[in-house]
Amino acid sequence: MATKIRLTRLGKKKQPTYRVVVMDSRKPRDGKYIEQLGIYDPRQEPSLVTIDNERALYWLNTGAQPTERAQKLLEISGAWTQFRVAKGDIHTVDAAPSSDGDAVSGETATAAVVEDVVTEEVAAEEASVEDVPVAEAAVEDVSVDDESSEV
């Protein structure tokens, strides 16, 4: 059976809310579904996205294909990223040794790498600004002659 993760529409006219469901791809949009994974309400500010990530991961691992909109909602909830990491498409930074020899959490190691990159970029920008000579003489030579304007 070809299963899809997609949206079914609920609500009145011009007031849609959606269910994120797993269903057979041959069923109609609002037909019978296998399992409800979550809710999407685009009318709230900000939009409400509630998805059961455990069940979504289960269905993604069993081969269910999300539609474009469902994939974006899974990205928002974090299930799509977890699936890609588990699949091996995205590589994460594991624990890196610190100067003390202890292991650092992945988040701290990632933050340290990002901080180093930002520091290097700022240093490069400052160096490029310092290398540019200031044309003070050119600025001082420009003056407005009141007499020359009276022609």
Image (cartoon, helix red, strand yellow):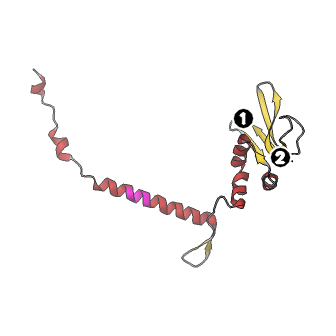
The crowd level at tag 1 (other Cα within 10 Å; few <14, some 14-19, many 20+) is few
Sequence-earlier tag: 2 or 1: 2
What's the distance in space between the residues labelled 2 and 1, CA to CA?
A: 29 Å
Instruction: Name the disc covering residue 3, or none.
Output: 2
State whether the magenta stretch is mostly helix, strand or loop.
helix
Q: What residue sits right under mark 1 in the picture?
A: 44
Place of residue 99 in the rendered image (x, y in percent of width and height, measured from the top left): 54, 76
Query: What range of the chain is rendered magenta?
Result: 120-124
**Is 150 situated left or right of 32 in this image?**
left
Measured as percent of width and height from the top left, residue 93 is found at: 61, 65
Please name the residue shown 87% across and 48% down the image. Answer: 1
Residue 112 left/right relative to 58:
left
| Residue 70 located within the stretch drawn in magenta | no
Circles 2 and 1 in contact, beta carbons < 8 Å: no
The quarter holding residue 72 reads: top right
- Three-letter amino acid code at disc 1? Gln
